[in-house]
Image: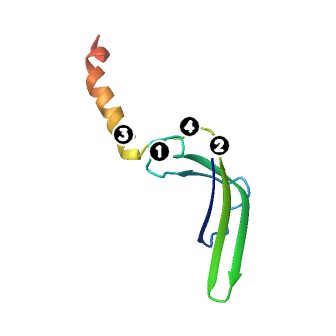
Amino acid sequence: NSLSMTTMGCPLLRYRTNMFIDFKTGTAVDNLYYARGVTHNISPGRFTTSLNMSSLLADGKYRSTYKTLKNAIDYIDKNKDDDTK
């Protein structure tokens, strides 16, 4: 998969920058992408960054910190009897 996007100017974005893009499809399109081309455009009163990106084929999956902690607490609660034996 590949994508192109323009965003507000961000000088931190550069070649090979990785980011997770979530299209909310629940498919392989929601994945980690890397920047294979970055162009910064600066003009009076305007700064944009254009990115051409390709998928890392990492089967990326977004997991919020809340969901990760909740899963850990549920696991601990479910298995706390094992700790006493």
| Residue at 27% from the left image edge and 23% from the top image edge | 78
Which label was assigned to residue 69? 3
Q: Amino acid at mark 1?
A: Tyr
| Residue at 62% from the left image edge and 83% from the top image edge | 46
Q: Secondary structure at mark 2?
A: loop
Q: Position of residue 17 (x, y in %)?
A: 67, 54
Q: Label 1, label 4: how many angstroms apart (C-alpha)?
A: 10 Å
In the rendered view, tell whether residue 18 sits above or below residue 71.
below
Q: Position of residue 76 (x, y in %)?
A: 31, 27
Q: Secondary structure at mark 1?
A: loop
Which label was assigned to residue 62? 1
Q: Amino acid at mark 3?
A: Leu
| Residue at 66% from the left image edge and 54% from the top image edge | 53
Q: Secondary structure at mark 4?
A: loop
Q: Amino acid at mark 2?
A: Leu
Earlier-in-chain disc, 1 versus 2: 2
Q: Is residue 82 at all visible to an observer of this figure?
A: yes
Residue at label 4? Answer: 59
Front: mark 1 or 2: 2
Residue at label 2? Answer: 56
Residue at the extreme top of the image, as rendered: 85
